[in-house]
Image (cartoon, rainbow, N blue to C red):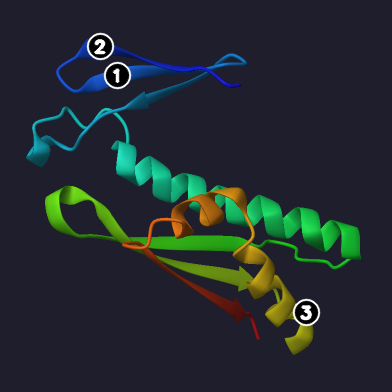
Amino acid sequence: MVRVTAKRRQGFTHDVEIQGGHRLVIDEPEVAGGADQGPSPTRTVAAALAACTAITLEMYAARKEWDVGELRVDVDMEYGDHSVPRSFDVTVHLPAGLTSDQAERLRAIAAKCPVHRLLAHDRQVTITDRVEVAG
């Protein structure tokens, strides 16, 4: 079990402590009544998806001894009703030099990251995965 605690700083700004000594500031944008002192909770979900995808791909590539160099993952999130995320568009940017088979395998592996799998359980959320190879 992991414990995460959110403590109100002021307004909607919260200091979030994650077991293990990690700290974040989570807030809402000014347009939503916050002070914009940190990302909103939903933007943090998109950040977690980007980071989890990148780490999952890097771990897989390391086991296969594939050089993914400066791998980059972009996540575009779209909101639906009541500011609830309804879609995530994940784009993995790979360096030149990988084969099309390697790129396709990495696209498939991207969908196996734990955050992707968690979000995919919500049938109202869509996630699109795409790979772009530099060239």
Q: Is residue 107 above or below residue 65?
A: below
Image quadrant occupied by the C terminus: bottom right
Mark number for residue 102?
3
Q: CA distance from mark 1 to mark 2?
A: 5 Å
Looking at numbered disc 3 in the image, what kind of residue is underneath it?
Gln
Q: Is residue 63 above or below residue 18?
A: below
Looking at numbered disc 2 in the image, what kind of residue is underneath it?
Arg
- Residue 67 in the image: x percent, y percent? 82, 66
As helix, strand or loop, the secondary structure at mark 3 comes to helix
Q: Could you say which quadrant of the image residue 79 lies in?
A: bottom left
Residue 99 visible at all? no
- Residue 23 in the image: x percent, y percent? 48, 19
Instruction: Tell me: 31 left or right of 9.
Output: left
Q: CA distance from mark 3 to mark 2?
A: 47 Å
Rendered residue at 14%/18% (across/down)? 11
Circles 1 and 2, Cβ within 8 Å, touching? The answer is yes
Question: Which residue corresponds to mark 1?
Answer: 14
Rendered residue at 18%/38% (across/down)? 29
As helix, strand or loop, the secondary structure at mark 2 comes to strand
Mark number for residue 9?
2
Front-most of residues 98 and 88: 88
